[in-house]
Image (cartoon, rainbow, N blue to C red):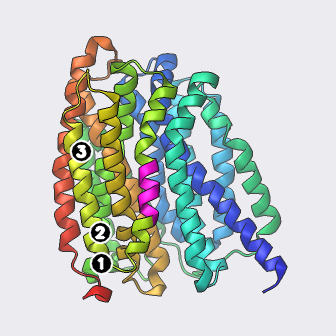
């Protein structure tokens, strides 16, 4: 191994670490700035949620098709273009003149995120030999958790002292650095599926169906929204049947049909993200509107959950190599359920100490769940389908996050409508927040049974 090849690998890893930090940061930091954005653009509760959801929706629906396109056209090419899109959209987001413009640009940013997220781990897998790959992937995953951990805190400081637009400006220099490194030092394309025909019809059906389902879900209980949800479900069923027949599917449905451990582990991941992601969104509003905290102080409190998650995830990942991941992940989901139950008892007079303790419990449970569950998903998959399995993990994460925001937005709309959240509607907001956490508890219990139903891993049978 030459010094040049080692240096090249380190530059590639450095670039992917940066993007692995920026993507979750852009997704989570904006939550702490929503009250400021709402004040400037006169957005109601639903409009605020769409500033966050537009990013998640576009990331979720484009991840699988763009991941497959990267396998055919070249992962470096898609990674490079994705970073250009993120940099350009970040500048434009910061220059937004209206709420609608910001939401549209957040959707554009999500497409770039899908291109980067869908290729980063695959590039690392391509350039690092098996003996060094685990360490490289571990560092990359850690950078994701650090991005999530620092997002509320840094987002709060930036919003309070420099304004919400600075959240987007601050990422641009790092994106430009990644673009330069990719263009200058990454020469390979890693098009392992070169020559395969891209399933365009399947991609279109998937994009339209997923978009209809997610958008409709967020607009319930309107009649048009119910129709969109039904159309989305039917479209996804049709997509599944189509993918079983085509020679080169963009989403290998057979992995779910033939591998119970893979299927139930993915279902558990979907439910886990669906019950946890909106916690930050709701508590950000609670801390600022109900308790009257500044964005900086609210961010400082909300950092408790992801910091605990980052600490525990690294430990539970190592434990999952020695003990059955099903037991560890299920224990984690049980702890999350307990934390969600405690959140349902929040009032207008709850102490910061009580809330911080709950966030620590939820973070501990999430960290206990995430790494072992990912290990359970990837472990039984044939090497030929590792890329597909990795994209599936990402899709479950983003879809679950989108569903989480959709549930929260639906309940906010039922109790508050599209009126601005203020002290006048504090009682309605508290009712909607508690109702949302009750729904999350019920879903989490279902996820716990799904986690236990997956069966034992072959290594621990």
* Residue highlighted by disc 2: 328
Where does residue 285 sit, x and y in percent of width and height? 37, 27
**Quarter of the figure with the N terminus:** bottom right
The 10 Å Cα crowd at callout 2, few under 14, some 14 to 19, many 20 or more, is many
Q: Which mark is residue 324?
A: 1
- Look at 25% across and 46% down and name the residue there: 339
Tell me the CA gap for discs 3 and 2: 19 Å
Q: Which residue is mark 3?
A: 340
**Magenta segment:** 307-314
Indicate left or right for 295 with 412 as reference: right
Q: Is residue 408 left or right of residue 107?
A: left
Quarter of the image where one finds residue 253: bottom left
Q: Residue furthest top?
A: 424
In the figure, is residue 156 to the left or right of 181?
left
**Magenta residue check for 311:** yes
Vertical relation: 46 (above or below) 82? above
Q: Nearer the viewer, residue 213 or 393?
A: 393
**Quadrant of the rendered structure where residue 138 is?**
bottom right
Q: In 3D space, how far apart are the residues under numbered discs 1 and 2 (Cα atoms)?
A: 7 Å
Q: Which one is nearer the viewer's eye here, 416 or 364? A: 364
Q: Is residue 81 visible?
A: yes
Residue at left 47%, top 17%? 39
Task: Look at the image and tell me in which quarter the C terminus lies.
Answer: bottom left
Between the C-alphas of marks 3 and 1, the distance is: 25 Å
Dot 1 and dot 2 residues touching (CB under 8 Å):
yes
Counting from the top left corner in percent of width and height, residue 192 is at 60, 81
Q: Residue at x 49, y 64 (%)?
A: 65
């Amino acid at each position: 191994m030459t010094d040049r090849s080692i240096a090249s690998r380190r530059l590639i890893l450095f670039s992917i670490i940066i993007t692995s930090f920026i993507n979750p940061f852009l997704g989570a930091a904006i939550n702490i700035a929503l009250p400021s954005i709402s004040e400037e653009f006169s957005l109601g509760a639903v409009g605020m949620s769409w500033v966050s959801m537009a990013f998640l929706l576009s990331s979720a629906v484009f991840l699988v098709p763009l991941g497959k396109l990267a396998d055919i056209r070249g992962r470096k090419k898609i990674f490079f273009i994705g970073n250009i899109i993120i940099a350009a959209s970040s500048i434009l987001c910061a220059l937004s003149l209206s709420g609608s413009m910001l939401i549209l640009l957040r959707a554009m940013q999500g497409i770039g995120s899908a291109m980067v997220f869908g290729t980063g781990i695959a590039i690392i897998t391509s350039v690092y030999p098996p003996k060094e790959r685990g360490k490289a992937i571990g560092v990359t995953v850690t950078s994701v958790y650090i991005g999530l951990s620092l997002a509320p805190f840094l987002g709060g400081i930036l919003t309070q002292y420099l304004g919400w637009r600075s959240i987007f400006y601050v990422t641009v220099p790092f994106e430009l650095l990644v673009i330069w490194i990719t263009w200058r030092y990454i020469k390979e394309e890693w098009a392992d599926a070169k020559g395969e025909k891209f399933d365009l019809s399947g991609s279109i059906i998937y994009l339209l169906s997923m978009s209809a389902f997610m958008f409709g879900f967020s607009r319930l209980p309107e009649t048009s929204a119910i129709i969109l949800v039904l159309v989305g479900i039917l479209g996804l069923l049709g997509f599944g049947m189509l993918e079983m027949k085509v020679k080169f599917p963009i989403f290998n449905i057979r992995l779910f049909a033939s591998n119970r451990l893979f299927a139930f582990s993915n279902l558990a991941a979907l439910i886990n993200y669906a019950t946890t992601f909106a916690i930050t969104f709701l508590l950000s509003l609670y801390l600022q509107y109900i308790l009257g905290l500044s964005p900086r102080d609210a961010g400082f409190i909300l950092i408790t959950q992801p910091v605990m998650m980052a600490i525990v995830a690294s430990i539970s990942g190592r434990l999952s190599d020695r003990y059955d991941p099903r037991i560890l992940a299920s224990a984690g989901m049980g702890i999350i359920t307990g934390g969600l139950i405690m959140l349902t008892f929040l009032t207008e007079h709850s102490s910061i100490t009580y809330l911080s303790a709950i966030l620590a419990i939820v973070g501990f449970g999430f960290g206990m769940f995430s790494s072992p569950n990912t290990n359970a998903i990837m472990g039984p998959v044939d090497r030929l389908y590792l890329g597909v399995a990795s994209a599936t993990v990402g899709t479950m994460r983003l879809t679950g996050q989108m569903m989480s925001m959709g549930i929260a937005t639906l309940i906010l709309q039922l109790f508050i409508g599209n009126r601005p959240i203020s002290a006048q509607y504090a009682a309605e907001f508290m009712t909607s927040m508690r109702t949302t956490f009750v729904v999350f508890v019920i879903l989490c219990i279902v996820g716990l049974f799904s986690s236990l139903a997956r069966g034992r891993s072959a290594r621990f049978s």
